[in-house]
Amino acid sequence: MGNSDNNVFYGSFGKEYLDIVRGEGVYIYDSNGKKYLDAASGVCVVSVGHGNEEIISAISNQIKQISFTYGVADNIPRQKLAKKLDEWAPSGMGNTKTIFSSSGAEANESAIKLSFQYHQERGNLNKTKIIGRWQSYHGNTVSTLSVGGRTSWRNSYAPLLHDSLHISPPYCYRCSSTDSHSSCAEYFANELQQVIQREGADNISAFIAEPIIGTSMSAVVPPKGYYEIIRSICDDNDIVFIADEVMSGMGRTGKKWGIEHWNVSPDIITTSKGVGAGYSPISVSIFSEKIWQAIASGSGSTTHSSTYGGNPLSCAVGCAVIDYIEKNDLISNAEVMGEKLMTKLSEELSDIPYVGDIRGKGLLIGIEIVSDKNSKDIFDPKLDLAHKIEDEARKNGLIILSGVPGLVNGVGGDHLEICPPYIIDEGHVNFIASTLKKSISDVIFSIEMV
């Protein structure tokens, strides 16, 4: 059905959207009965697959008991999920406590607000500024757009945005440094130190980063040692380190959290997509003992809350998702299948001269398309190449994500993201790689012929 045929306010009025009517495992089906392998997991959401009977059963059982509580009432699923998240949290965070919301943006809002309160409770009244990174994404609210660095989305609302500070992303594929890879970490991380020195540490509240960068850069992985330096800089300057794991958390990268690929524990972890796995909206902000203890021993309260945050139905889903991941060893499968998919993509795409970089961890994988492998020059943004490849893949029965414009210089750069459910097998891996090869080749050929 086209945009003009119903009352939905779509993000793109000139685009035709699929009517998806059913999902089963890694597949989704449209209203015409066509089957697609969902190598996007919705948008990095459906971690345990579509139509998962164990999650559906958990929903049914909970909704028969109670679906909503708020305010003075607590509920058992919320307590259980908070306990499970504490068990999953990196050990360096100590005894954690969790605030529940409904979206990744809300989780990051919680982290930003309570970072500020953490400093206020300790008498550091000037610590108000947030440092983010360019080509990052932390949500679509005014505050999260402000700290994010996705220029193509910021520009439309620029007059509304708050003043925030930004540093460069750790983008090794286009790094201008000629140092060794280990020094590359210092090259990028030291920019944080420079901004702190310029602005004054007494004015900085928090630094927020996606451990592995999502759809703004399609799975850019920082160099070895990067987050260790970031952690040290934050510690030295009494700055809260927020790890935005909305995309990279909950086992997607082959570890519980993307940040665990480095020897680092953040002060706050936020995540959303993989917690509810597409079965119920839920997000979490996990606070280290250091953060919540300062508030507990100070004012003893926070006014931050949200209506549906911590509702028993969504929390029951979160518990069921974690149980399913653990019982079926899906984090290990994400690691193993991710390695196989990276290898297969490298094999299939190696003879396409326009595939510049294949990167990622686990089942969070990115492909960068360039006009020349040696120079790494980008295609004209007007070609909208990534979207064309996404559309072609869909015609071929494969759902992927086209990366958001602005990868290079805030304007151009074509990239694709592949993030299938954790339940994929080698047959799915082979289909993804071969279909991507055909889709990329066909789109490039059509452009070359113009």
Image (tube, grey):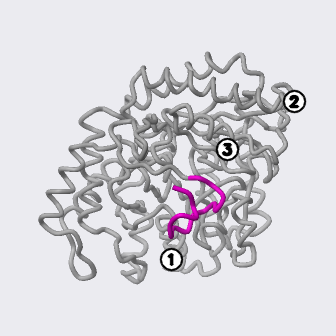
Say above or below: 264 vs 66.
Answer: above
What amino acid is found at the position of numbered circle 3 in the picture? His
Q: Is residue 447 left or right of residue 61?
A: right
- Residue 114 location in percent, x, y? 49, 72
Q: Quadrant of residue 59?
A: bottom left
- Residue 97 location in percent, x, y? 34, 63
Q: Cα distance, mark 2 to mark 1? A: 47 Å
Q: Nearest the camera: 33 or 315?
A: 33
For discs 2 and 3, the disc positioned in front in the rendered view: 3
- Residue 332 location in percent, x, y? 37, 29
Residue 117, label in figure: 1
Q: Earlier in the sequence, mark 2 or mark 3?
A: 2
Disc 2 to disc 1: CB gap under 8 Å = no
Q: Which residue is mark 2?
A: 375
For discs 2 and 1, the disc positioned in front in the rendered view: 2
Query: From which residue to which does the magenta span run?
Result: 1-16
Q: Earlier in the sequence, mark 2 or mark 1?
A: 1
What amino acid is found at the position of numbered circle 1 in the picture? Gln
What amino acid is found at the position of numbered circle 2 in the picture? Ser
- Residue 21 location in percent, x, y? 38, 49
| Residue 242 covered by magenta stretch | no
Total number of numbered discs in the rendering = 3
For discs 1 and 3, the disc positioned in front in the rendered view: 3
Secondary structure of residue under mark 2: loop
Q: Cα distance, mark 2 to mark 3? A: 23 Å
Q: Is residue 1 left or right of residue 173?
A: left
Q: Is residue 425 left or right of residue 124?
A: left
Q: Which residue is mark 3?
A: 387
Image point 50% across, 77% down: which residue?
117
How would you classify the magenta stretch by its main secondary structure?
loop
Q: Earlier in the sequence, mark 1 or mark 3?
A: 1
Say above or below: 32 vs 304.
Answer: above
